[in-house]
Amino acid sequence: MAYRYLTDRLIEKINLYISRYPVREQAIIPSLHEILYEYRDIPQEAVEELADYLNIPISHIEGIISFYDMFRHKKHGAKNHVRICRNLPCHLGKYKNLLELFIKLTGAEVGGVSPDKLWYIELVECIGSCSIAPAFLINDDLYDGSKIKSETDLKEILEKYI
Ligand code: FES
């Protein structure tokens, strides 16, 4: 099958997730995050291609999409997409403090766009970077949240995306 939606970048990422997990199914969620980042939603064709690539039934992937709110089908339209991991290692790493700082500095709520349309904040499941918990992504850039010690630290990062 020739892939239209699974770009080279996506295939590279998906291969990375396949290699990280013992069971192929475990690559589905991080792969869907990548698709979401790429297209700002989950195109049906991308789901079909992912199912083919992972050799997993489409219905299985659809089940995951319908279970998690974060895999919405509407585009948010903000310039920057912040994804903060909320799974256990990141929870222990106090992702909530980080989230509060994001909300304060951007004016966006979780699942919402900031008034200036620069920021969309989303809480996500593990992004495969537990060693730097609490981990977060701004667009495609991965950050170690433990290095954010103050409002100023985060402000400096956010300014790069304005
Ligand atoms: S649990 Fe947060 S990156 Fe894995």
Image (spheres, grey):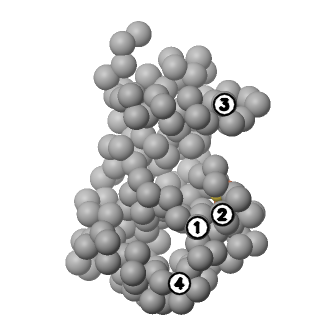
Labels 2 and 1 touching (C-beta < 8 A): yes
Label 4 or label 1, whichever comes before in sequence order? 4
Q: Secondary structure at mark 4?
A: helix
Label 2 or label 1, whichever comes before in sequence order? 2
Residue linked to disc 3: 19
Residue 104 in percent (x, y) is at 43, 88
Residue linked to disc 4: 100
Label 4 or label 2, whichever comes before in sequence order? 4
Label 2 or label 3, whichever comes before in sequence order? 3
Residue linked to disc 2: 132
Q: Amino acid at mark 3?
A: Ser
Residue 3 in percent (x, y) is at 36, 19
Q: Does the closest atom of ligand 1 sit within 8 Å of the Cβ of label 1?
A: no
Q: Secondary structure at mark 1?
A: strand
Neighbor class of circle 4 (other Cα within 10 Å; few <14, some 14-19, many 20+) is few
Residue at (26%, 63%) from the top-left corner?
79
Neighbor class of circle 3 (other Cα within 10 Å; few <14, some 14-19, many 20+) is few
Q: Amino acid at mark 2?
A: Ile
Q: Secondary structure at mark 2?
A: helix
Does residue 41 appear in the picture of this structure?
no
Neighbor class of circle 2 (other Cα within 10 Å; few <14, some 14-19, many 20+) is some
Tell whether 65 sits left or right of 40: right
Residue 133 in percent (x, y) is at 67, 66
Tell whether 150 sits left or right of 18: left
* Alpha-carbon span between mark 2 and mark 1: 5 Å
* Alpha-carbon span between mark 4 and mark 3: 34 Å
Neighbor class of circle 1 (other Cα within 10 Å; few <14, some 14-19, many 20+) is some
